[in-house]
Amino acid sequence: MNTITNFADDIFAITHRKPAPKVRQYQVTWPCGATWQFDRRDLDIPEFRDGKEWGLTFCFASIREATDMLEGRGCKVERIA
């Protein structure tokens, strides 16, 4: 293939690609008032006590798992975007 054809294929691919899906953002509010924002791409959520990170980080496999466990600890989980 020649260079002009490769260039045309690249331009077509760029101009006709589908937009990336929106990633929902969530926020957890700990009982001490500390907040942490997360989404499905990064589900490593630190624990907060007395307004500071406590040193324990929860690693979840899904938003549902994170929501269930955090709400069980008295946290409020809400979708923000």
Image (tube, helix red, strand yellow):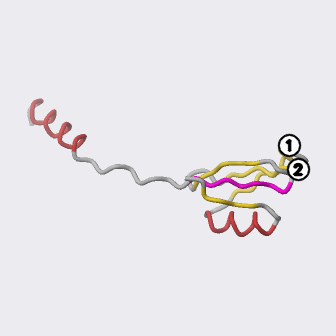
Dot 1 amino acid type: Lys
- Residue 61, picture quadrant: bottom right
Residue under the point 19% across and 37% down: 11
Q: Is residue 11 above or below residue 64?
A: above
Q: Residue at x 62, y 55 (%)?
A: 26
Q: CA distance from mark 2 to mark 1?
A: 6 Å
- Please report the residue visible at 13 percent of the width from the left and 36 percent of the height from the top: 8
| Residue 9 lies within the magenta run | no
Q: Is residue 43 above or below residue 51?
A: below
The spot of residue 80 in percent (x, y) is 60, 53
In this orientation, which residue lies closer to the viewer: 79 or 17? 79
Residues 36 and 2: in front is 36
Q: Secondary structure at mark 1?
A: strand
Residue 24 percent across, percent down from the top left: 53, 55
Please count the marks in the image.
2
Q: Are marks 2 and 1 in contact (CB under 8 Å)?
A: yes
Q: Position of residue 62 (x, y in %)?
A: 61, 64
Q: Name the foreground residue: 58 vs 80.
A: 80
* Residue 10 - label: none
Within-10-Å neighbours for mark 1: few <14, some 14–19, many 20+: few
Would residue 19 appear left or right of 2 to someone viewing this image? right
Residue where numbered disc 1 is placed: 52
Residue neighbourhood size for the residue with mark 2, other residues' Cα within 10 Å, grouped as few (<14), some (14–19), many (≥20) = few
Q: Which mark is residue 49?
A: 2
Residue 4 placement: quadrant: top left
What kind of secondary structure does the magenta stretch mostly adopt? Answer: strand
* Amino acid identity at mark 2: Arg
Q: Residue at x 41, y 54 (%)?
A: 21
Q: Where does the magenta region start and end?
A: 25-31
